[in-house]
Image (spheres, grey):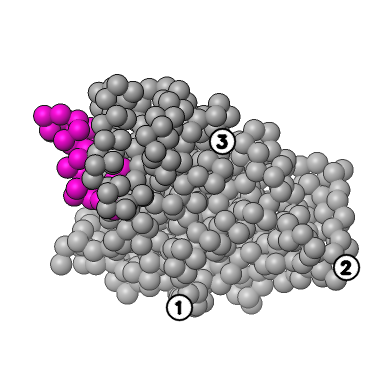
Amino acid sequence: MNVRDTKNYTMLCDFYEFTMSNGYFKTGMYKKITYFDVFFRQIPDGGGFAAAAGLEQVVEYIENLRFYDEDIEYLRNKGIFDNEFLDYLKDFRFTGDIYAVPEGTPVFPGEPIMTVRARAIEAQLIETFVLLSLNHQSLIATKANRIVRAARGRAVSEFGSRRAQGADGAVLGARAAYIGGCSAAACALTERDYSVPAFGTMAHSWVQMFDDEYTAFKTYCELYPNNATLLVDTYNVIKSGIPNAVRAFSEVLVPKGITDFAIRLDSGDITYLSKTARCMLDDAGLNNCKIVVSNSLDEFIIRDLLLQGAKIDSFGVGERLITSASNPVFGCVYKLAAVENESGEIIPRIKLSENVAKITNPHFKKVYRCVDRESGMALADVICLHDEVIDDSKNYEIFDPDFIWKRKVLRNFEAKELLVPIFKDGRRVYNLPKINEIRSYCKEQIDCLWDEVKRFENPHKYYVDLSQKLWDVKQSLLAKGN
């Protein structure tokens, strides 16, 4: 069997994960239980929150983890790995626990969005794939949601496959964009594999293939009467594009009683052209004809177009969405937070740095989201030790760890745990939701954030607090310097 023909990504990891794992094996540390947190430090584009995505691919990866003969032989040929370690890898499986926030959950810097509890080698070897999956899809879901919110209820389709960084960037990027709120994607493979609705019309080449624009439009309407969106800017939008589209619609579709059709603008002054097109379509009695626009859009351009009164019904957004061009790195990291000793006691670990932002939060943790019982709005998140329970029958005082004098008392709230069990003893205990369920959940949860948190510029900083017990543990480790 050629391992490249499978979806097994066991070897998709940084080489140092093998050197460390070999070292753990040779020193007898490979059976030690470790706790690793996945978290991020900064929200892309200076936003107020991010949307978590990519968990389903992590689950599939964990369930398919195994080394093939070709993998073992490759490692053997490096000449640096212990033979007993390589024999150990032949029967390698993930046997640990994983906790994570469900896909679509709004998340904030510093809080774990996934925690891995596993033997040292198992936890170490999965680092790269876990990070690349959560980093990529969380980035695109977050960007997509910004763009969707800028569209103010108008549909947004993801059009970026040809500008994505590779095949997975296109396919999984479209999946993440759908989670973030896009209504469809251009990528057919994403629909086949992930049930994201695929949508497409025509390219300029279709129009150019015909002797004249009208014939191109007429033929398309005849072929696809229930899915006719005509690209009107191949030659001249005002002089020929719209008049020929009006003629094709009126002669082919209207007599059949079909009223669902559209034009697409892909260049030029979109505000001016959309206003002019709307007038021309209405004057022709085609008030129902929709106007779709594309052309290197992002949330700020969309916001400006609508502020200028552009007459747009939906958007197609490509390269700036699928690559998150304005901020193309999400920045999740994978850091050791604790180990267990021989008696099962959890020993916290901390990473120190002269860069304060890189100092980690130690210990095995859980995260609560405190939600107002009356409004249903999210008030704050609290990171606690794993065995703590927030008593939401009482008032609870929180503070901003960066500005401890900024305190806030929570009243009449419900505390909800964010991290849910995904794997227990190597067995999946989580039912993966369908993509539409994830998308709906994402919208519901983002609707629970205050508008001030959702501002594009200078958003209100959402409180992410450390419990007093966790704060004390962290301070004691800081004082000891380890």
Label 2 Cα crowd, 10 Å radius (few <14 / some 14-19 / many 20+): few
- Going by the numbered disc 3, the residue's amino acid type is Asp
For residue 409, side relative to residue 129 (left or right): right
The local crowd at label 3, few if under 14, some if 14 to 19, many if 20 or more residues have their Cα within 10 Å, is: some
- Where does label 1 land, which residue? 427
Q: CA distance from mark 2 to mark 1?
A: 37 Å
Residue stretch rendered in magenta on the structure: 202-229
Q: Which residue is mark 3?
A: 45
Do tag 2 and tag 1 residues touch (Cβ < 8 Å)?
no
User: What residue is shown at x 62% (from left), y 58% (from top)?
Assistant: 445
Q: Nearer the viewer, residue 409 or 12?
A: 409
Q: Residue at x 53, y 40 (%)?
A: 151
Camera-side residue: 297 or 365? 297
Q: Is residue 143 left or right of residue 461?
A: left
Tag 1 near tag 3, CB within 8 Å: no
Q: Residue at x 29, y 29 (%)?
A: 243
Q: Which residue is mark 2?
A: 394
- Closer to the chain start, of discs 2 and 3, is 3
Measured as percent of width and height from the top left, residue 308 is found at 55, 26
The picture places residue 289, in percent across and down from the top left corner, at 39, 42
